[in-house]
Image: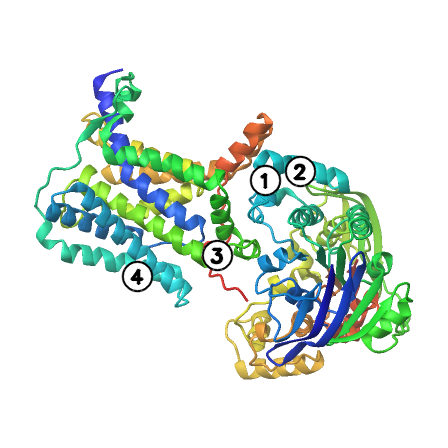
Amino acid sequence: MNEELINILNSIIANATPLVIAGLGETVSERSGVTNLSLDGSLQLSAMAGFAAAIASGNLLVGCVAAMIVGAVIALIVVVANIELRQDMVAIGFVLTLLCADIAQFLGQDLAGQRMQPMTKLNIPLLAEVPIIGPVFFQQPAIVYVSYILIFAIWWWMFHTRGGLAMRAVGERPETAFARGTSVNCLRYVYTFIGGALVGLGGAAYSLAIKPGWTTPPSMRGEGWIALAIVIFGGWHPFRVVLGAYLFAVLRALSSAIQRSPDIQIPLVLLNMLPWLLMIATLILVSSGAIDRLLSIMPRPLQKWTRNFLRSDPPAALGTRFEQD
Amino acid sequence: MELEFQHINKTFGRVRANQDISLTLRAGRIVGILGENGAGKSTLMKILSGYQPADSGEILVDGVPLHAGNPQAAIEAGIGMLQQDPLDVSPFTVLENFTYGQVPGKRLNSREAAKRIREQAALFGFDLDPDQTISSLSIGQRQQLEIMRLLELGVKALILDEPTTGISAEQKEVLFAALRNLAKRDGLIVLLVSHKLEDVIALCDEVVVLRGGVLVGDRQMPATTAELVELMFGQALTPQSRESVPLGSSALRFDGVTLRNKRVAVEKFTLEVRHGEVIGFAGLDGSGQELILRACAGLVRPSAGHILLNGQDLTGKHFRAYRENGVVFSSAGRVEEGLIAGLTLTEHLAVTNSGAFIDWEAQRERTAAQIKHFNVRGTPESEIQQLSGGNQQRFLMALLPDRPNLLVLEQPTRGLDVDSARISGSSCWRAVMLARQSCSHRPIWMRW
């Protein structure tokens, strides 16, 4: 395979990583029933905080932790306002997204133009040597490897542990979860906190690795909304969310490649629309009857897995408050 | 196990749902808790199973006070409740649902649990596959799963809230056989909450009757239906005498109509309904009644045959054409679909009015008149959710258009409270009573 293509694929994986991590974070909190709409602002503020902390301490890890704390605190505001103050999560999240974006710009004024050595690429021994796969997946910054681990860890937790069963039950039917002895609101706190921390880590992935540094306006502006859309596209399934993030990165790479090529004349605006149009088309395909027909001819064990994978209903109790009477 | 209720009291606002209820239940018996809707039977059972706390009073389990602040604590004390709408999680599989929420220390791994489900299902004659998702199950199957799950948790007292609503006759037989086994063979206390006399008579050893939150009777079976009816309603009820009505011309005709949906097909159905006739559809849910009723309103298109309204062929026409011809359809979900929480009664009526502008004064007067006519407890300014279920039902009648040619009602008495039910004793008659209330001329009623 040619060198250039491998380089492109490698950068696609890297570029998708913040979306992967933030999308997984949002999946975790939405699966427990909490919509954290503050994603876009949260990504910007945590990216800024992560960068600032990394510069102040001279340590990238400190930056990551700072970003995670910021993301988690913002998510906590959403869930506290909802559970304790009985506020609507969507309203709170929306206000927070605007607020955090502005705070990030304000506090980040002096950071613009400052430089710091971003995360360097690490080659994983043995795996990096595998042809094609190695250079694409295993010659990446550390944060990318963290995202790989997260994908499988979250999937495993959700579908193969009792904790995951409780998490999904809380998002689907909290009354049932309560009846089975699960503390609904406590779990919502925990998963929203974790989800928010992951969103923060996604922010750090931008400012410390993928788009290093801080600019005004921030380079990751708008990415949070994309992450939210990818969660919906991904049907709240970690694998599909990740697939959505990668697909999105591929489409972006494609549109910038087309832009660069002198032979093809397509307006830039039209190209930017491409990922969205394809997403809508995919969603329609997934929810159409074609999938059911496909399922019916598959072997039985595979059917269950595929149906679970293609499921695109939101958690039934998403965005609702739970009060035990 | 022995369960003893001691002076249980519970109020909701001004409503005294349970008043000083004392009762003792013994192992190995099937006890029916009988009463009208709103008599307080569900409240009492929710208190027993930990879903609601009592205001005062105590429940003793084998002489030990039960501290059940939540359902989990009640289950640990050996008391489990099967809700009318089983509390499960619809995207979960049977297996996931079965294993979720097991008491620590008694946990099974997936393979053991799947095996256990198959064994238990075979034992009770239940029809369950561990890999099915809950959303693909019928209510009857979900009940079966929930019963198995509660038994797995070591429940010694099993409460079933209106378990025969929405399940097939076959499933009911299986369920009753299982319950008899549980009581007689395994010595469980089985509590059957119901307002259906026939279920209670068929199954129970003992019947406890509640009325208006008060325990009014405790009878060993067999008891006569008349005796139980009198306890339930506080008076012996005689069916209203029927008024005979001269029948008019043909209002609706089905000519060899074939209807299909995913689950059931109605083949070559022929029926003639004349003005002044009341037709009831009996049968189990999902036997095709809803297809026929929806076809009457033009909501389902027949794949063969003809539907004539007042002699006019409307086969395959849009439901608007049916509406213009005076067909009024009220679905089983009318309370959910027909009323809008947050709007006042006046606003509800104003919505049914045509014209771009609203004369609020006139609407308010019209609403006041309808409230009086239909005996609704509320004011024109009340918001709909402030009304009780029965009042909402009656107000819905006020929303139906005047002088329909054909009135199609799907389960018109579903969820009626004591008040509405008191109009008449037997459920078959309620629809007609409501009809007489609402319409001075003679519409055609369809129900089952």
Dot 4: what SS?
helix
Please give the residue where the numbered disc 1 appears in the rendered image.
B108
Mark in front: 3 vs 1: 1
Mark in front: 1 vs 4: 1
Left or right, A157 with reference to B112? left
Q: CA distance from mark 3 to mark 1?
A: 23 Å
Image mark 1: chain: B
Left or right, B100 with reference to B31? left
Dot 1: what SS?
loop
For the C terminus of chain A, the quadrant is: bottom right
Mark identifier at residue A95: 4
Image mark 4: chain: A
Q: CA distance from mark 3 to mark 4?
A: 25 Å
Instruction: Tell me whether circle 1 and circle 4 mark residues in contact (CB < 8 Å).
Output: no
Q: Residues within 10 Å of mark 4 (few under 14, many from 20)?
A: some
Callouts 1 and 4 in the same chain = no
Q: Earlier in the sequence, mark 3 or mark 4?
A: 4
Please give the residue where the numbered disc 2 appears in the rendered image.
B116
For the N terminus of chain A, the quadrant is: top left
Q: Amino acid at mark 4?
A: Val
Q: CA distance from mark 1 to mark 2?
A: 9 Å
Q: Amino acid at mark 3?
A: Val
Q: Earlier in the sequence, mark 1 or mark 2?
A: 1
Dot 2: what SS?
helix
Instruction: Tell me whether circle 3 and circle 1 mark residues in contact (CB < 8 Å).
Output: no
Please give the residue where the numbered disc 3 appears in the rendered image.
A184
Image mark 2: chain: B
